[in-house]
Image (cartoon, coloured by chain):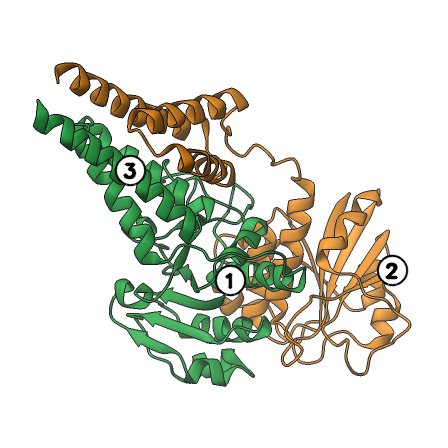
Chain colours: A orange, B green
Amino acid sequence: MEITVIFLGAENEGNIGSLARVMKNFGLTDLILVSPKVMIGKDAIKAAMHAQDVLRSAKIVEKFEDAIKNVDFVVGTTARLGWNYNVLRTPIYPDQLSRLKEVEGKVAIVFGRESSGLTNEELNKCDIVLTIPANPEYPTLNITHAAAIIFYEIFKMFKKSQAERYRCASRIEKEKILEIFHELLREIEYPQEKTQIAFRIFRNIIGRSFISGREAHTLMGVFRRTIMVIKRLKQKK
Amino acid sequence: MEITVIFLGAENEGNIGSLARVMKNFGLTDLILVSPKVMIGKDAIKAAMHAQDVLRSAKIVEKFEDAIKNVDFVVGTTARLGWNYNVLRTPIYPDQLSRLKEVEGKVAIVFGRESSGLTNEELNKCDIVLTIPANPEYPTLNITHAAAIIFYEIFKMFKKSQAERYRCASRIEKEKILEIFHELLREIEYPQEKTQIAFRIFRNIIGRSFISGREAHTLMGVFRRTIMVIKRLKQKK
């Protein structure tokens, strides 16, 4: 699946540059501008930061039809769900974009004018309409903010198995640290009736913290030394 | 849970306004600027669009400490994971923020300067560090794009089930437990050169685990008793 970003009737140069930047942030490079009201000048270049390449390779076309003629699946974006909205379209939300995975060819994500978004006619040319859940009192996001959220969701979905971003402590390591903590409780003669609770609480904290292997070893080291210090002091007594 | 947005050393008026807009888009209103390099002028007002109220009520303070003094849980943001990165911090991702639900008091989301982000010293004052998965070739998002993604995830999470809550430990409780842990390290004569690392690791685990008030007190009890046992044994020596 390839993704093309289409921006219709851009009214602000900064937004073009800013869109290029956030595209590159999420690994997208293919930008088409449909009859922009402004040209790509220094404000766009400034906002694009390190995404000049995206900006330079942007295509400019006259009509929306030209932009989507080689596209297999067109995703329109809109904030206007409350009013002036074609109720026949049931919008999807950014975190439902995983369905895009099933598309084999080209996918376009289409953003409309800053002032008025996509027209109903344009939305009707899209395969699906996407909206971002937001504050009903002010749901209209800046176009590049909407883009950031959508690109982020797409990026996430393709990187899904980020499960092990770092090596989480293994079961054995976690059991070991719990065992040592238990030994510590015994060594300090922690009241019998409270031991179970303290132990559970410690286990919960360890579990929720997604402790890494390295962290587990450091903490084990601290507890082991504590126990050793206590034992030694007891012997000398 | 209340959310405060903190923007440190803002360098660009447009970004302040744009941040206010996206805050309002996701129902947030409480903005604190820490020693901004620019004042709120017409560019900020223009970028804020229909979020003038957020901009008007923004507080300006001198120091980061002033901004977080009443905050119970501080979330720092960073893009700099590859280089110049304090390897001791294991970051969380925006879609793991659902754990914030467990915090009952104030939560701050902290954004750093456009040019250089948060310093390591500032990140060290945070309970957790958050990063947005992005293109490794250009992972640095515009600050308001990062904000859009984070606020969107938070907004989504509150729209989902308001499942079981518990009282997260307050800032004071967390400081107390860290202090006691530090005392323990001293008491067991933990090697000087490793103390800082052990301390940081413990702090990170506490942060990531969203420790509850009750859990914090139990753990403090265990450590206090340990210290007491060691001291008593030393006296008898």
Mark 3 — on which chain does it sit? B
Image coordinates for residue A155, horizontal then vertical, percent: 65, 47
Q: Say whether marks 2 and 3 touch (CB < 8 Å).
A: no
Nearer-the-camera pick, B20 or A224: A224
Work out whether disc 1 and disc 2 sit on a shared chain: no
Identify the residue under disc 2.
A127
Q: Residue at x 36, y 67 (%)?
A: B10
Query: Which residue is labeled 1 in the image?
Result: B147
Which chain is disc 2 placed on? A
Tell me if mark 2 has few (under 14), some (14-19) or many (20+) residues whose alpha carbon lies within 10 angstroms of its own: some
Image depth: mark 3 or mark 1 in front: 3
Q: In this orientation, does residue A167 appear?
A: yes
* Amino acid on which the number 3 mark rests in the picture: Phe
- Amino acid tagged 2: Asp
Q: Quarter-wise, where is residue A102 in the image?
A: top right
The percent position of residue A146, horizontal first and vertical second, equals 64, 65
Of the two numbered discs 2 and 3 in the rendering, the one whose residue sits closer to the viewer: 3
Q: Amino acid at mark 1?
A: Ala
